[in-house]
């Protein structure tokens, strides 16, 4: 049957009554109706969860596979076949159909992280179905249907073979699953061809086979597995591992693949497959590639090091699915946010973005002129790079105060009454808020002893805390922290302005707006928030606007799926509008209106007020009015979508970093 596949002796396990009953019940099912693709889901269900997490392995549903292979090659092939079938002249139609079949037979596809083979199985099936339609149309042009009984019908009418497909997989078991799945799909397709041609080619012995290699794709030479000169497409769903979650050996692989890239240590594991694919394109520039990846590769700090490298090597993005939520049929459904990026050195004339109103929605296809690293219709060359100071805002933003105290300068609820009872200590007890306290109206307090006189520091309650803080800092491995032991009565940072705008560093991705607020000098802000000292209602209005929110969602990274606001990447790079005093006053009034409406809901937290399912209608209306007013500061013509807003902001950013006047953009169409 097949010496390689059946060469090992299989051990039949002992079955109990329950297993025997399940086997008999399973045997009664119509297995011919079960798709070989389902093996991928079955494999993930039995895969060790810890191993799955370590490898970053996520089974890919057919729906998500089509997001890759559809725009990469399948949509074009379907359209081409439809055009051929529309040819009126029979002889010309037959000629074009045979040429189309030869084209299908010439396609070679590789998946360098094939897992249980679903990408390859679905791609093979879809190419065979196209071939089947073409063969049927060829036979329909010929009155002599007797040829369907030719002995050599497989060579003449079935030319797309499983040995045109190549895969790499690190683990041995899924590699075997991939080979078996391809054989099973080949058998299914032979049955379909046989139904058309009147004779079924036997599936046994197993002659052709998919070329699945059990290797580490990142340490292997891809030309030893893939036929580089003949390869047409690279597809797949490489491991998702984030830069902070991968193992030391995986981190070493990333650094080895990006040896000359600054900040390579911040790159996700999946970026290695992008670079390896790009290297193979140097051997054959006709190769086109598309991968499913976490959306982090198109956000935040990873964008410039990854895409700066790929673009410098001549890569262009030809199509992309913007952020969508991962869904599949496997158990333990992967709760991640993904993108699909199709790229090559051969730039396509027609480019497409698949845009989502929200990550759970269905995509809308938009033809665009260009696609940049943020998956927007904007210039490839523009990267939002970290800035140590604001390029446009007139006030600086700072990180809140890191205590670095081992909790000793924090007054927990159980101790608050004891400290408050010491009357002369009260001026040095201040409210303490971070992201959670701001959003959920929780109370915490701290000792703020900056500039406190010696008599306060010698109070026993205080002196004990100071000494414990000193010990914690001296025991630290960090030299900077040990140095702080010289002033153990103080937080590491000493920012306590008269008033400031508070911006939480992390916020739920479900919120349309990051809830921000104001605090006074009676409150200390932790390093879980950013602050804009002496920020005005106008500053608050711009920061709470939709224009700023779409910028934040695009250029900032994420903590898991939550927004992670970055001072250097977001605030310092955001293009603020040029305004008159009258316009400034209008924004201030609209911002104050939002603050007043919030206060009209006493006892309701910001987390609840900004929950999209609970947000009061008057608050939503106030934000809408602010959004419209802020957008009018940027452009006379209303924006129709977030993509338009971002494209406009990117153009302003480009002019700002080039020190060009951006006022002309106000009148753009």
Image (spheres, rainbow, N blue to C red):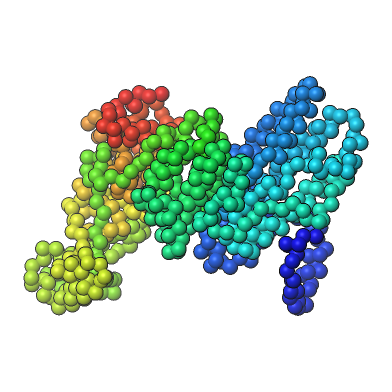
**In this view of the protein, which residue sits in the foreground, 109 or 632?**
109
Which quadrant: the C terminus? top left
Q: Is residue 586 visible?
A: no
Q: Is residue 138 left or right of residue 233?
A: right
Image x and y of residue 186, in percent: 76, 50
- Among the 4 quarters of the image, the one containing residue 20: bottom right
The reply to whether residue 483 is visible in this rendering is yes
Is residue 11 shown above or below 291? below
Front residue of this view, candidates 502 and 592: 502
Vertically, is 179 above or below 155?
below
Say which residue appears at 28% left-offset and 45% top-offset.
387
The answer to whether residue 234 is left or right of residue 632 is: right
Residue 655 at x, y percent in the picture: 31, 31
Residue visible at 88% across and 43% down in the picture: 151
Residue 489 position within the rendered picture, expressed as x and y whole percent measured from the top left: 16, 69
Q: Quadrant of the N terminus?
A: bottom right
Residue 49 lies left or right of residue 533; in this view the side is right
Residue at 18%, 53% (x, y): give it.
Answer: 497
Farthest residue to the left: give it: 454
| Residue 211 relative to residue 137: left or right | left
Nearest the camera: 199 or 422?
A: 199
Q: Nearer the viewer, residue 109 or 117?
A: 109
């Amino acid at each position: 049957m097949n010496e390689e596949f059946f060469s090992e002796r299989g051990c039949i396990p002992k079955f109990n009554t329950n297993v025997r009953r399940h086997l008999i019940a399973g045997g009664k099912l119509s297995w011919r109706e079960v798709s070989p693709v389902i093996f991928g889901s079955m494999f993930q269900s039995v895969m060790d969860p810890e191993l799955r997490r370590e490898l970053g392995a996520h089974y890919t549903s057919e729906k998500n596979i089509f997001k890759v292979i559809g725009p990469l090659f399948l949509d074009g092939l379907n359209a081409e076949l439809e055009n051929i079938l529309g040819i009126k002249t029979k002889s010309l139609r037959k000629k074009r159909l045979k040429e189309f079949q030869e084209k299908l037979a010439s396609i070679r596809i590789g998946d360098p992280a094939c897992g249980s083979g679903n990408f390859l199985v679905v791609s093979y099936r879809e190419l065979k179905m196209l071939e089947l339609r073409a063969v049927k149309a060829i036979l329909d042009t010929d009155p002599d249907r007797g040829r369907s009984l030719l002995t050599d019908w497989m060579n003449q009418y079935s030319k797309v073979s499983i040995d045109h497909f190549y895969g790499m997989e690190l683990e041995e078991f899924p590699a075997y699953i991939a080979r078996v799945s391809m054989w099973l799909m080949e058998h299914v397709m032979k049955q379909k061809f046989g139904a058309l041609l009147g004779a079924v080619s036997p599936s046994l012995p197993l002659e052709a086979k998919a070329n699945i290699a059990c290797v580490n794709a990142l340490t292997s030479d891809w030309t030893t597995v893939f036929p580089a000169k003949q390869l047409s497409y690279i597809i797949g769903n490489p491991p998702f591992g984030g830069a902070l979650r991968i193992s030391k050996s995986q981190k070493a692989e990333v650094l080895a693949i990006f040896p000359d890239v600054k900040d390579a240590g911040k790159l996700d594991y999946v970026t290695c497959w992008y670079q390896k694919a790009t290297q193979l394109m140097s051997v054959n520039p006709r190769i086109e590639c598309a991968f499913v990846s976490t959306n982090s590769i198109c956000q935040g700090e990873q964008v410039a090091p990854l895409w700066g490298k790929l673009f410098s090597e001549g890569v262009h993005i030809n199509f992309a699915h913007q952020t969508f939520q991962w869904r599949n049929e496997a158990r333990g459904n992967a709760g991640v946010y993904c993108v699909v990026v199709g790229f090559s050195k051969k730039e396509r004339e027609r480019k497409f973005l698949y845009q989502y109103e929200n990550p759970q929605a269905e995509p809308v296809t938009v033809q665009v002129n260009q696609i940049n690293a943020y998956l927007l219709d904007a210039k490839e060359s523009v990267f939002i790079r970290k800035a140590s100071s604001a390029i446009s805002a007139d006030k600086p933003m700072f990180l809140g105060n890191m205590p670095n105290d081992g909790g000793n300068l924090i007054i927990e609820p159980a101790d608050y009454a004891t400290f408050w009872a010491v009357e002369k200590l009260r001026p040095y007890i201040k409210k303490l808020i971070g992201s959670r306290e701001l959003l959920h109206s929780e109370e915490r307090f701290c000792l703020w002893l900056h500039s406190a006189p010696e008599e306060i520091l010698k109070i026993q309650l205080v002196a004990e805390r100071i000494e414990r803080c000193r010990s914690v800092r001296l025991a630290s491995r960090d030299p900077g922290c040990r140095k702080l032991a010289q002033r153990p009565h103080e937080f590491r940072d000493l920012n306590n302005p008269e008033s400031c705008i508070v911006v939480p560093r992390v916020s739920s991705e479900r919120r349309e707006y990051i809830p921000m607020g104001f605090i006074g000098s009676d409150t200390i802000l932790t390093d879980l928030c950013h602050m804009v000292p002496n920020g005005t209602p106008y500053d608050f209005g711009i920061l709470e606007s939709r224009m700023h929110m779409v910028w934040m969602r695009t250029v900032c990274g994420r903590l898991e799926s939550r927004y992670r606001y970055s001072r250097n990447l977001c605030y310092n790079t955001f293009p603020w509008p040029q305004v008159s005093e009258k316009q400034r006053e209008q924004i201030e009034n609209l911002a104050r209106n939002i603050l007043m409406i919030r206060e009209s809901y006493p006892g309701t937290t910001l987390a609840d007020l900004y929950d999209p399912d609970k947000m009061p209608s008057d608050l939503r209306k106030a934000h809408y009015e602010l959004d419209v007013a802020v957008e009018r500061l940027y452009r006379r013509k209303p924006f129709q979508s977030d993509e338009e807003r971002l494209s406009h902001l990117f153009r302003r950013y480009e002019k700002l970093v080039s020190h060009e006047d951006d006022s002309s953009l106000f009148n753009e169409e």
